[in-house]
Image (cartoon, rainbow, N blue to C red):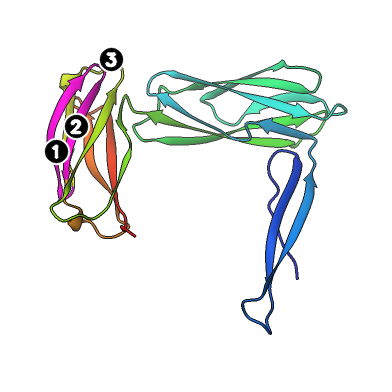
Amino acid sequence: MSVELQAPLNPGPVAKSVWLECREFPGVERPIALVAQVAARIWAEPSTVDIEIPRGEMGTASVLLRHLSEVQITRVVSGAAEMNVEMADAGEVAREVKLRIDGSSLKAQEVVEGRLQVFLDSETAPALNVPVRWRARSKIRFAPGNLMVVPRDGGLRRTVAVLLDANVPADTLQIAALVPGVDVVSRKTQGRRVVVSLAVDTQQFSPGRNASAVRAWTSNGEEEDFLSIVRVSAE
């Protein structure tokens, strides 16, 4: 018998448990504790970078690279043309990498993936690849972004908000239901948000269905966001 475990990206102790079941006696189980120590020459904090950038603007993030004392980081390389990297000392066994990401070419709802490559000493292959993902942050956002609803006779009412960035006038916001059983009853502007009252007929949603039920968008079509409705069991 063999057991495979995926090591975490950062060093340190790992403790897991597996259960063995006796073939001759179904239902009889025994726990087996697995303990390990993950070691690494170099690791990143955070191990992945995921940020949102308003379209047309610059996004920033930082990564702390930690390493063993006998290891020397010689250079870091950006894996994407939109991403610039700059490294500085952050202690005897750490380097800080600052990321600047150009969001001028981002499209609405777009997600871009890149990576930060870290090289040690004279090695030609990167010793570490840090995944970096960035997405266009809409200037209008539903809060919350999804609703969990339980079937109920006669339907129900729910209230959500659409948050607006400072440069988005509330009177340019359009809101519409996309699926049967959902109606936009009213809206009210409160500062930088628009409060929306919804009527939901839960009987028109199949169990477990996750639908983009309501769309909000600006009249110029540049910004949009969607509200999802999830119908869940009452049990």
Residue under label 2 = 196
- Please state which of the two labelled residues, at mark 1 or mark 3, is closer to the viewer: 1
Are the two marked residues, 2 and 3, in contact with CB atoms closer than 8 angstroms?
no
Residue 118 percent location from the top left of the image: 71, 30
* Chief SS of the magenta region: strand
Q: Residue 50 carries which label?
A: none
Residue under label 3 = 167
Query: Does the image show residue 219?
Result: no
* Alpha carbon separation for disc pair 2 and 3: 20 Å
Are the two marked residues, 1 and 2, in contact with CB atoms closer than 8 angstroms?
yes
Of mark 2 and mark 3, the one earlier in the sequence is 3
Q: On the image, which quarter does residue 122 sit in?
A: top right
Residue name at image x 30 percent, y 56 percent:
209
Q: Is residue 197 above or below residue 90?
A: below
- Please state which of the two labelled residues, at mark 2 or mark 3, is closer to the viewer: 2
Residue type marked 2: Val
Q: Is residue 211 above or below residue 184?
A: below
Of mark 1 and mark 2, the one earlier in the sequence is 1
Q: Please rate how many residues cluster around mark 2, counting C-alpha atoms within 10 Å: few if below 14, some from 14 to 19, many from 20.
A: some
Q: Nearer the viewer, residue 181 or 174?
A: 181
Q: Give the range drawn in magenta.
A: 179-199
Residue name at image x 15 percent, y 56 percent:
153
Helix, strand, or loop for circle 3?
Answer: loop
Helix, strand, or loop for circle 1?
Answer: strand
Q: Is residue 47 left or right of residue 168?
A: right
* Alpha carbon separation for disc pair 1 and 2: 7 Å
Residue type marked 3: Asn
Q: In this view, does 67 lie to the left or right of 82?
A: right
Q: Please rate how many residues cluster around mark 1, counting C-alpha atoms within 10 Å: few if below 14, some from 14 to 19, many from 20.
A: some
Residue under label 1 = 184
